[in-house]
Image: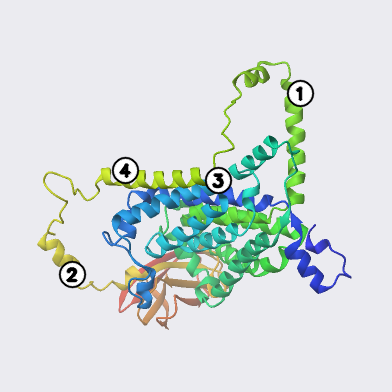
Amino acid sequence: MDVSSRPDRQSLRGRIQHFFYQEQVPYGVALLRIALPLVLLQTLLPRWIHAREFFSADGAAAPLAINYSLPNFPPEPSGTLAVAMMTALIVALISACIGWLTRPSLLIACGLYTYLTMLDCVSTMTKYSVISSHMLLLLSLSQCGSLWSVDAWRKRRREADSGAESQLPQAFPIWPQRLIQLFIALVYFGAACTKMHTNAYFTSDQLRYWLMTNVNNYNPAGELLSFSPAIVIFMANFAIVWQIIFVFVIWKPVARWIMLAIGVMFHASTTPLLGLYIFPQVMISSYLSFVEERHFQRVSALLRQFWSDARQRLEGGPLPALWQQWRPSFRVPVGVTSGIVWAAVLLTTTVAGVAAESLCDPYGMRRPEGPHELKPLNAQVAERIMAPNPPIPFADRLLSFDVGSDMLGGVLLTTQTTVSRGEPFFVQASLAPPHEDAWLNCQLRDADGHLLHETGQIVSRNRLRGDWEFTIPETSPAGRYSFALQHDGQIIAERTIEAR
């Protein structure tokens, strides 16, 4: 039962106890236990062959603690040890996913994942890695291995061999699941608090640069959306409101699914818009922790009904008989201690991983001609790299030069090529940061190039745009006019409009 459905007369202490200690079958954390390792393996498997380079003293590790003047924290392992740790991490995640000695697997995965990511703050440590390490720790406190796992299967086997009756899934106190839910909600709340101190977020500048660039990955849809500042501003403000209220309304039954649906759409959209792949998968997977027993029972009832109908339609056909003929009959001896087998698999796989990486010989240590050597850089290339950066022309700092009638928060919402005589409109120049203090002139010229009006302003280094308000008098003839943006006596941009 959801805490919001408890009677109003219940005491505050009783509500808190019910919120944290009511007993439920841990369907939500079991689903999260399966999904989260699968997501993390997408990033760890490609890095396995490079473990010696990323995480060891033999390569080029980039420990996070260096930024805080803490040398050798955590200690950089040798290349062989780094490969062994990476292999053991992958095995632990797979073991946690299938639920084989679930708690030890999650603890090992949490420890190794945190350790290795702290050794590579350049690429492996990201926002999703920090969130994932916390969720792995909280999952290890739960009974997520009691469902859909090797542990649960072996438990049923032992009960069957001892003659005990098969029991329904066991319920446990829900507090580990609540901690994961609170953690996700507070992550959103903290993200919103950070955005509140970033003025560029509310003016859409921050999002627009993310949309236009391929800092994360290729994102063609983001480049198209960057031409619609009104939509970007709405999305930015809507997202921060959603993040703030998430922690307060997610506990309400109806609001929960609305908030989660918005979250799924929000995170899924970051893939085509911002080029994010793993982060949205981690966050959407975390939503599985909000699945509770009553939710799963409803979905399960619908699926059972669907399966029952489908089976009735298939009765008498060849599939049931074929399944009975090929149904596997393999049985693992119950007397074999699962922990011994698990430890043996972990140790054997780790040793095999180290041996396989050694056979790959990434540094060429066993080559007849000796290990790979760094080749001297061409003198001209080295000189060009070491030379001071040439000054960037101010014209290259100009992001856009547009004409429009509507502004919101100092941002031109729409661009247009046609204006009405007698009605005011705006001309706006947007600059890319960083830039120096600049004096910008905006000139209005007629179709013959004659100067009709000129105005200027200082655009200081902390501003990203300058805007001017113009009105073409009704007494002026209809036709084509142009605007020219000048800096230091040179025209750096022009824009043509049609006056009606």
- Where residue 393 appears, as percent x and y from the top left, is 28, 72
Say which label, 1 or 4, has the lower sequence index. Answer: 1
Q: Tell me the residue that label 1 is attached to.
A: 312
- Neighbour class for label 2 at 10 Å: few (<14), some, many (≥20)? few
Q: Tell me the residue that label 4 is attached to.
A: 356
Q: Amino acid at mark 3?
A: Trp
Say which label, 3 or 1, has the lower sequence index. Answer: 3
What's the residue at 28%, 71% (across, down)? Answer: 392
- Position of residue 8 relative to residue 50, above or below, is below
Q: Amino acid at mark 4?
A: Ala
Q: Which of the two residues, 104 or 394, is positioned nearer the viewer here? A: 104
Disc 4 from disc 3: Cα separation: 25 Å
Q: Amino acid at mark 2?
A: Met
- Neighbour class for label 1 at 10 Å: few (<14), some, many (≥20)? few
Q: Tell me the residue that label 2 is attached to.
A: 386
What's the residue at 43%, 68% (across, down)? Answer: 401
Q: Tell me the residue that label 3 is attached to.
A: 100
Disc 3 from disc 1: Cα separation: 35 Å
Say which label, 2 or 1, has the lower sequence index. Answer: 1
Q: Give left or right: position of 278 versus 20.
A: left
Disc 3 from disc 2: Cα separation: 54 Å
Quick one: which residue is furthest to the right in this view? 9
Where on the picture, by quarter, is residue 15?
Answer: bottom right
Where on the picture, by quarter, is residue 142?
Answer: bottom right
